[in-house]
Image (spheres, rainbow, N blue to C red):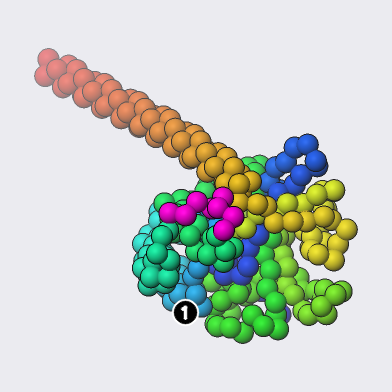
């Protein structure tokens, strides 16, 4: 049976995430795509580039349940989607703070180790970065038709991860009937080496799929990790071909390169936010001016009508 989606959908990502960095040997850039015509996206990134999110299955379940209820009752989902997402961030920060206080801080005596220190174990570096980048977590992006969006890849091993919890390791539409899992709806495939069934999908595929279902606005809550993978030799046409079985040369970006890309991305996002705020202020100013002109026009019309009535009364008295 075909799934019906509302015009504005709430999508929660709890699968594995991966940012892709294209490198032709001389220059490099993140793999992006453009928002299709007639669509908008409001995106929450739980962590910045190069950082893994440490949310557990129980936290994913709690957040999903809260999101389902709020999607039914909060009018801001249709009127102010940034405000809608902002109202959810305190709970996410509470989860993150709890993970740091109960696990990371007791485990590591020093959280100030710089991630260029080669003596730091990679697993330890994941935890240390999660703590260090806390202030850059939970950024919100507003994107309209034609705007560029980072084309992350999402994955899940269906044998070991699909049934971990009700809402973990999924890409769920939480305001559609039966809460469809887009990883299941869009694509599944079998890798040639391991013969294990994996689901792999890119953000652009998710957007195009939803557009085909009549969706116009996407509220995209991305709780996945964001390690950066370098793709060498060719620009892939299908992100499902990017894996260790393909002809692409891939490798995980080193900590130094990740820091540089993350700084550039954070700077770009801040510039976009400032530009959006400036555009918003200009728009508000124009609306205020139009309102004042309208009020002035109405006031002038009332004064003219009042003067006309007075003249008529004077004439009648005479």
| Residue 45 horizontal side relative to residue 85, left or right | right
Picture quarter with the C terminus: top left
Query: Which of the 4 image quarters holds residue 304?
Result: top left
Q: Which residues are magenta?
A: 112-119
The residue labelled by disc 1 is 58
Is 153 or 277 nearer to us in this picture? 153
Question: Which residue ends up furthest to the front in the rendered image?
Answer: 119
Note whether 286 is above or below 266 in the view shown: above
Query: Which of the 4 image quarters holds residue 6?
Result: bottom right
Label 1: which secondary element:
helix
Note whether 63 is above or below 24 in the view shown: below
Which residue is at 36% across, 27% downward?
A: 289
Measured from the top left, where is residue 274 in percent x and y?
46, 36
Picture quarter with the N terminus: bottom right
Which residue is at 62% across, 58% downward?
A: 227
Tell me, yes or no, whether the highlighted magenta stretch contains residue 267: no
Magenta part mainly helix, strand or loop?
Answer: loop
Note whether 156 is above or below 298 in the view shown: below
Is 192 or 189 nearer to us in this picture? 192
Is 261 or 45 nearer to us in this picture? 261
Which residue is at 51% across, 36% downward?
A: 271
Measured from the top left, where is residue 156 in percent x and y?
68, 73
């Amino acid at each position: 049976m075909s799934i019906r989606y509302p015009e504005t959908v709430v999508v929660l990502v709890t699968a594995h995430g991966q940012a892709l960095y294209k490198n032709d040997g001389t220059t490099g850039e993140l793999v992006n795509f453009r928002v299709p015509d007639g669509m908008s996206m409001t995106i929450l990134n739980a962590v910045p580039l190069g950082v893994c999110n440490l949310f557990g299955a129980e936290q994913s379940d709690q957040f999903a349940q809260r999101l389902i209820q709020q999607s039914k009752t909060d009018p801001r989902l249709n009127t102010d989607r940034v405000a809608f997402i902002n109202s959810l961030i305190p709970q996410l920060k509470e989860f993150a703070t709890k993970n740091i206080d109960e696990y990371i801080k007791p485990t590591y005596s020093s959280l100030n180790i710089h991630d260029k220190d080669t003596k730091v174990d990679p697993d330890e570096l994941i935890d240390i970065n999660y703590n260090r980048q806390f202030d850059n977590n939970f950024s919100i992006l507003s994107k309209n038709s034609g705007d560029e969006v980072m084309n992350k890849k999402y994955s899940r091993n269906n044998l070991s991860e699909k049934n971990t919890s009700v809402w973990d390791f999924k890409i769920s539409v939480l305001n559609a009937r039966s809460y469809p899992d887009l990883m299941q709806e869009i694509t599944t495939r079998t890798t040639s080496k391991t013969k294990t069934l994996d689901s792999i999908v890119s953000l652009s595929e998710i957007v195009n799929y939803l557009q085909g279902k009549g969706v116009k606005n996407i509220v995209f809550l991305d709780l996945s990790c964001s390690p950066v993978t370098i793709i060498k030799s060719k620009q892939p046409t299908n992100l499902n071909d990017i894996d260790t079985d393909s002809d692409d040369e891939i490798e995980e970006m080193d900590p130094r390169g990740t820091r540089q890309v993350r700084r550039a991305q954070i700077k770009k996002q801040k510039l976009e936010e400032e530009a959006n705020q400036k555009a918003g202020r200009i728009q508000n100013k124009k609306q205020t001016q139009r309102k004042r002109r309208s009020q002035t026009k109405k006031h002038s019309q009332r004064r003219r009508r009042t003067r006309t009535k007075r003249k008529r009364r004077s004439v009648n008295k005479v």
